[in-house]
Amino acid sequence: MYLYPKWIRLWHLLNALFCLMLIITGLCLQYSGKGRPLIPFDKAVALHNTGGIALSLSYFIFFLGNIFSPNKKHYRLKYKGLWKDMYTQFNYYMFGVFKGQKHPFPVTEENKFNPLQKVSYVLIMYIALPLIIITGWGLLLPDITISRVFGVSGLILTDIIHIISGFIISIFMIIHIYLCTLGSTPGSLFKGMISGYHVGED
Amino acid sequence: MPENKHYFFLIFLVPVLFLSGYLPAVSQEDQNSNDQETEWVSEFYEENEQCFKCHGEAKYSLYDEFSEREVHKLMCESRVINRDKYYISNHKSFSCLDCHDGGYQDFPHPVELRTEEHYACLDCHGYDENYAQYHFEEIEEEYVQSIHAELEEEGFNCWKCHNPHTYHISIRNTTNLHETIAYDNNICLDCHSNFNRFQLLTERDEINIIERHDWLPNQALHFGNVRCIECHTQVNDSILVAHLLLPIEQAVQRCVECHSRDSRLLTTLYKFEAKKQRTRAGFWNGAVLKESYVIGANRNLYLNIISITIFFLTIAGILAHLFFRMKAKSNQTNS
């Protein structure tokens, strides 16, 4: 089943690369020290800035794509029965998968994501990423960031929001990559994201 | 989907408002700092006015006996002393004649007074128990090793940085660190970005401070939040402000000197504050947070613990899940 058009695959690949680069350089900045670093601070700053600008552009492409292409339907949450569906999917991940049960929400052209995927993708793409991008620009251009909020440096608050968003996205990435091994074979979903074709369960 | 539109709008509105400054920015310290100045009048005010009536103004007047009329002249800029600045300076309580020769009471001043020998800092502050806590002798020791001391032949002395008529202590009793940083940096810029003064002491070409610091990211932010001496002096533990100005090639250029947990700023700019408190609300180097934020130097202990715990729980959860998956698969294969 052809599920992932070229633009989505290209965006997904770039998004993954930029996120990975930003996580690594971000950690180098946050935990910088006088010892021998993985990436020197000044280079980490330059790479993090470049990666941030690239991620902003890539997000912009995703945002426009999800406005003007049919892909937007996959991000539309239907609140009725959402908690029940999420619980069903959670139950499958926790127990069903060990019992060899079938996916409770098989992938179709109309329903690319299961309920847990849908909610997490919406939260990541429409809350965490905008937050990290906006606060990232705030840190890149500190002159536009409010200097003090209630007696506290505006940069601190901006940076804390940035770091927390970054951490949530990092944890999401780890879980996302692991859950992608739950396809019909451990590598099938990764292959699908390269070829565009999803291989379902027998 | 009209509901979703509102949803997106709100998602973007909050951070945009936050960044663009619509949320109220209140610093009580800033508000209070202006209200605390008290009126102070020097006991030598009237006596000093004899000098200030000419040296406190841009012009002075003298009576020309030959033409029998009063003549107005411009006061040489370097001889003008700003009254307001003098009376908030460290030496505000002095009479002009405490430091200057009594011959200045004659007018016109005798020509030989132009080469009057000035006091040096240690002449009054050195080897005196009253000033022992400020370690003036150690400051002198640092100064003689600094690159500035090499210019003494050309006329460099303490007064070049610490103008006796205007200098006031800033970092020790600051209520607004950013003003203090600007004040202290202006002392350096007074010569280093003013070629007229700079060339009095050196044959070197004019320095363009901005170009010289091209390598520094967020230059304006750095210039507004740290003093020149943070990078251009050798750290000294026993005196509050380091005076050993280093040669240019030894100036700090490694970002991690400041952007790290054992940040250099704690031993320089925030030395005074850091002595009072090492942590604030769980932040490492909390002293810095009062005025600024330094990536890499400010980390929150609680956020660190929470994030590391979540990270390891995630990894442990994934490994456990993987283990049970493999076990289930092997059971299925066997059966």
Image (cartoon, coloured by chain):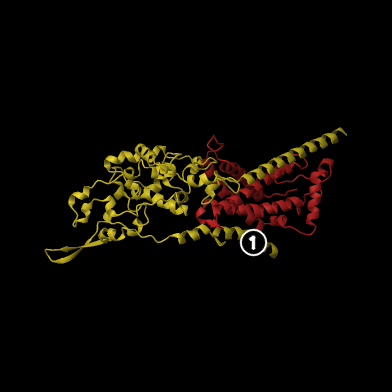
Chain colours: A red, B yellow
* Closest to the observer, B235 or B95: B95
On the image, the x and y values in percent for residue B99 come to 28, 50
At 35% across and 44% down in the image, what residue appears?
Answer: B125
Asked if one can make out residue A191 in the rendered structure from this viewpoint, the answer is no
* Closest to the observer, A152 or A126: A152
On the image, the x and y values in percent for residue A184 come to 78, 42
Is A64 placed left or right of B135 in the picture?
right
Q: Mark 1 = which residue? A: B10
On the image, the x and y values in percent for residue B270 come to 49, 46
* Closest to the observer, B227 or A73: B227
- Residue furthest toward the bottom? B69
* Closest to the observer, B306 or A95: B306
Q: Quarter holding the C terminus of chain A?
A: top right
At 29% across and 40% down in the image, what residue appears?
Answer: B152
Is B138 placed left or right of B14 in the picture?
left
- Name the kind of residue labelled 1 in the image: Leu
Is A78 placed left or right of B92 in the picture?
right
- Residue furthest toward the top? B334
